[in-house]
Amino acid sequence: GFAKRIAIANLAAIPILKSRQIPIAVTYSDNLATKEDSPLAELYRSLLWHADAMVYPCQAMAELGRPWYNKNKKPTEWIIEDPCQTKEAPFKDLTKQKPCRIIWFGHQANARYLFEQIPLLTEKCNSWDLFELTILGDEQTAKIAQKILSKCKSKRPWIFRFTRWDTSKQPKQLQTELERAHIAIIPSDEKNSRKSAASHNRAVDAVMAGCMTIASPLTSYCELHKVLLLTNDFPRSLKEGIIQYERLTNKWTGLRLEHLSRFSKTHNNRKWEEFFIKMSTH
C-alpha cells in the first residue's frame, strides 16, 4: 500500500544522505518501530539507527526509541514538548440541579479505553444527581459509546451528547468544548507500549481550559500529578473528585501556570529554534 511505498522510498534515501554527510534528524512521537505489523516499522528502525538527532515529545517516548540506536554512534536527543493548544480558562462551578458535565475527547485509537469505563462509571457513580457525557471525536466512537450507555445500569441519570471533531475548527472547537465541561476523563493503558509513552498534550489542554482532569497514570501524566487526578479506578476518582471539586479546582488554579508553563507556544518555539540552530552548525 501507500505506507509501504513511502517506507521503501525513504529507506533508499537514507544511505544517499549519509554518503553526502547530510545530518538526519528524526521526530518520533509514536512508537512505530516496535509495531511488527506496520510497514513503517522497518523504516523507523533504520531511521533510529542512522539518526544524528532525535526529537521526542516526552521522556517516555525517548525511552522507547533508545533500544534501536546504533550503539557506536548515538544521536543527540531533544525533548520538545507539544505546545498547549488551549488558553487559560477558569474551572467551572458545579451547580445543584444541573448536570455534572464530563468530556472525553480523542482519536478512535483510544476509544476502547473509554468503552471499558462507561459501564463502570454509570454503575458506581452516585455523587451527583445528573451526569452528561460528551464525546468529542468521530461518529463511530460516538455510536458505540451511546449504545453501551443505553444498555448500562446506572445509579443516576446520564445524558449523552456528541460533537464531531472538526479539524478545520481547531483549536477553537476544543477550547469551547473543554470550557463547557467540568471534568475531562483520559483513560488509557500504561502497560501497552503503544500508549504508555503518550505525550502530555490531552491532559495539558484539558487542565489549561479549566477541566478537572482524571487520567490513567501514563508516565507523561504522572509528571503533571500536582494539577490532575491519576487513577486506575475511574469511578472512585470521579466520585472523590466531585466531592472535593471546589477544594481541588481552587488549588489547581494557583498551581497550573507554574506546572504547565513549559508547554507554552513561546517555550515550544524557542526549543525548535535552538534545535535548528544546532543542526545547521552540525
Image (spheres, helix red, strand yellow):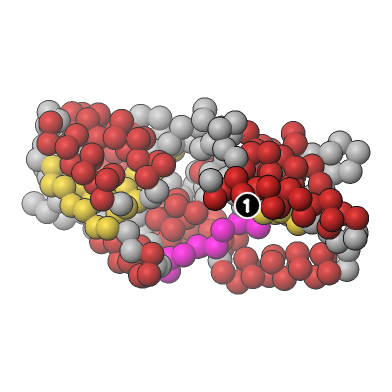
Residue at position x 32%, y 52% from top? 137
- Looking at the image, is 235 positioned above or below residue 8? above
Pinpoint residue 206: horizontal percent, then vertical percent.
40, 55
Quarter holding the C terminus is bottom right
The amino acid pointed to by label 1 is Ile
Pinpoint residue 78: horizontal percent, then vertical percent.
73, 54
Pinpoint residue 240: horizontal percent, then vertical percent.
30, 37
| Residue 120 seen in render | yes
* Badge 1 element: helix
Residue 145 horizontal side relative to residue 197, left or right: left
252 or 171: which is nearer to us?
A: 171
Total marks in image: 1
179 or 171: which is nearer to us?
A: 171
Residue at position x 17%, y 37% from top? 147
Q: Would you say the magenta stretch is mainly helix, strand or loop?
A: loop
Residue 96 horizontal side relative to residue 59, left or right: left
Pinpoint residue 15: horizontal percent, then vertical percent.
84, 51
Residue 79 magenta:
yes
- Looking at the image, is 161 positioned above or below residue 208? above
Residue 57 horizontal side relative to residue 273, left or right: left
- Looking at the image, is 114 positioned above or below residue 2? above
Residue at position x 81%, y 46% from top? 50
97 or 268: which is nearer to us?
A: 268
Query: Which residue is denoted by mark 1 in the rendering?
Result: 6
Residue 234 horizontal side relative to residue 150, left or right: right
Residue 31, by quadrant, is: top right
What residue span does the magenta drawing correspond to? 78-89
Residue 152, by quadrant, is: top left
| Residue 244 seen in render | no
Residue 190 magenta:
no
Badge 1, how many Cα within 10 Å: few under 14, some, many 20+? Answer: few
